Image (cartoon, grey):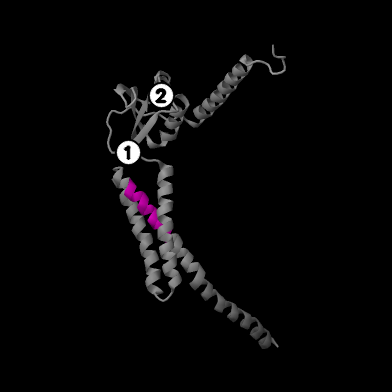
Amino acid sequence: MNRNVKMLIFVPMLESSSIHPQLHHWVILPLLIFLARVCDVSIGTVRIILITRGKRNIASLLGFIELLIWLLAISQIFKNLDNVVYYLAYAGGYAAGIYVGMHIENKMALGIQIVRIITRREASQLITHLKSEGYGVTTIDGQGAVGPVKVIFTIIKRKDTPHLFEAVQRYNPQAVISAEDVRFAEQATLRKAPSFFQNSFLNRFKFERRVNERESIDSRLPNSDEPAN
C-alpha cells in the first residue's frame, strides 16, 4: 500500500520536472539574456558618454562591469547555439539597452553647456533675473538680419538647462536659443542648485507671487456685472 502511494506521488513530480527544463530553456534563460544585454549595453552607452565628458575613472569601472555582464550573456549563447530565441533575446536586449542608456544619461545630465541667447527685445529683465538666479552672464550688442540684437552668453550645468529655458520663455519668448556641450571650462560661474528646503520655499513664494499678480490684474479689470455706459 505504501509502495503504491509512493508511486502515485512520484509520477506527478516526474511529469512536473519535465516542464521546468522547457520553461527554463524557452522563457527564463532568454529573459535573463535579454536583461543582461540591456544592462551591459546601457552601461556601455553611459560609459562612452562619460569618456567624452572626461570622467575616466568612472568610465573604467563601468567598462569592467559591462564586460563581465557581456561574458555571462554570451556564454549562454555559445552553450545553446541551436535556440533561435536566445539570438532574438540577445539582439533585442542590445536595442533596448541603447535606448535605456541614453535615457539614463539624459536623466543624469552630466557635464556643462554654453548657451547663446539672441533677442531683439529689451533683455534687461532677463539679464537681471539670470544674475539673481546665480548664472554667470556675458552680454554683447550685435547686428542681426533685421536690426540690432542683444546676445547673451552663459555657461551652465546640463541639469540647469530646463530652468534656464523656462526663464527665457518667460521674459523673452521670441529669443533664439542655442546650446552646445563644453569639454572644459575654467573659472566659470555656475549656478548652485538650491537645496530641497530652499526649493520648497522658492516654489511657495513664486506661487504666492503669481496669485498676487493675478489678483492685482483682476482688480484692475472692469466688473462684468456693472452695466456698460
Q: Which residues are magenta?
A: 36-49
**63 on left or right of 169:** left
Q: Residues within 10 Å of mark 1 (few under 14, many from 20)?
A: some
Find the distance from the CA under tag 1 to the CA under tag 2.
Answer: 20 Å
Dot 1 amino acid type: Asp
Among the two numbered marks 1 and 2 on one chain, the one whose residue lies closer to the N terminus: 2
**88 on left or right of 151:** right
Residue 39 within the magenta-colored segment of the rendering: yes
Residue 85 in the image: x percent, y percent?
A: 45, 70
Q: Name the quadrant of the N terminus.
A: bottom right
Q: Secondary structure at mark 2?
A: helix
Residue 8 in the image: x percent, y percent?
A: 66, 84
Residue 155 within the magenta-colored segment of the rendering: no
Would you name the residue on which mark 2 appears? 130
Front in this rendered view, residue 79 or 118? 118
Would you name the residue on which mark 1 appears? 181
